[in-house]
Image: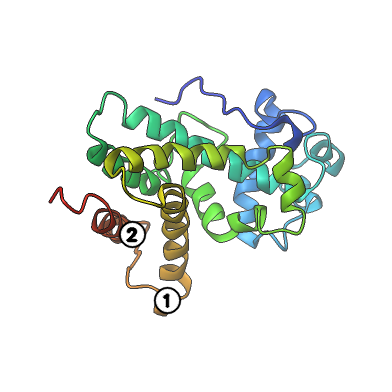
Amino acid sequence: MAIGIKISLNEGLFQRDPQSTALGQKIIKHSILLIDEIGFEAFNFKKLAVRMQSTEASVYRYFENKHFLLLYLVCWYWEWVSYLIDVNTMNIEDPKRRLEIIIHTLVSASQENPAIEYVNESVLHRVVVAEGSKAYHIKDVDEENKVGFFLNYKQLSAKVATVIEELDANFPYPHAFASTLFEMANNHIYFAEHLPRLTDVKVQQGNFEEVEGMLKYFAFRLLCKNSG
């Protein structure tokens, strides 16, 4: 399904598009694996270069610093989820069914797609769950927002908000609820794996069925109250 796909991201995130070269793809691949292994705080370009058997200078030719690299990875994931939603809801007219598919896609987007060799989606998903909020819970968020660094997430949220409005035109918080679905999914996966007393769902061996069930419960209890 994803053969030939090139994810389009804000050019301000990188010095050179890493998707365009073998070295850049190697940087993406190994940064995902290394951040997942040691965490973002311990991650740096020197360690990445050692893992890649390359040099720090080669990494800096693509990214100004590790914050921009993390933001690039998170934006890549958001755009990947958006793409999957488009594909999975194509030709589906019923907004309730589309929202069901969207919620399922939020969870199943973490499944690895071997067609994109330099991105392990399941590992990237773990990175987004554990580290993703660090990409935008930062002091410079307003400045980065002005140059469009978070546009991918905004467009994804707006896409889901549109479906929510179609499903329930009187629902007063479609954009808030759209972004809440994404944040809830990631937060409760994290809670289930690390802080289980903060949630009621369980995640075992990468099975997110209970998370999906929780999202659908909230969504359809709030929306379409008269639709049954």
What residue lies at 56% left-to-right and 24% top-to-bottom? 6
Q: Secondary structure at mark 1?
A: helix
The answer to whether 21 is drawn above or below residue 74 in the figure is above
Label 1 crowd bin: few (<14), some (14–19), many (20+), radius 10 Å: few
Task: Determine which residue is flagged by label 1.
Answer: 198
Name the residue beneath numbered marker 2: 211
- Of 116 and 107, the residue lying toward us: 107
Q: Which mark is residue 182?
A: none
At label 1, the amino acid type is: Leu
Please state the horizontal and vertical placement of residue 140, each as a whole percent of the image.
77, 53
**Residue at far left of view:** 228
Q: In terms of secondary structure, where does tag 2 sit?
A: helix
- Kind of residue sitting beneath label 2: Val
Q: Which of the image's four quarters has the N terminus?
A: top left
**Residue at the farthest bottom position:** 197
**How far across and how far down the image is residue 94, in percent?**
22, 33
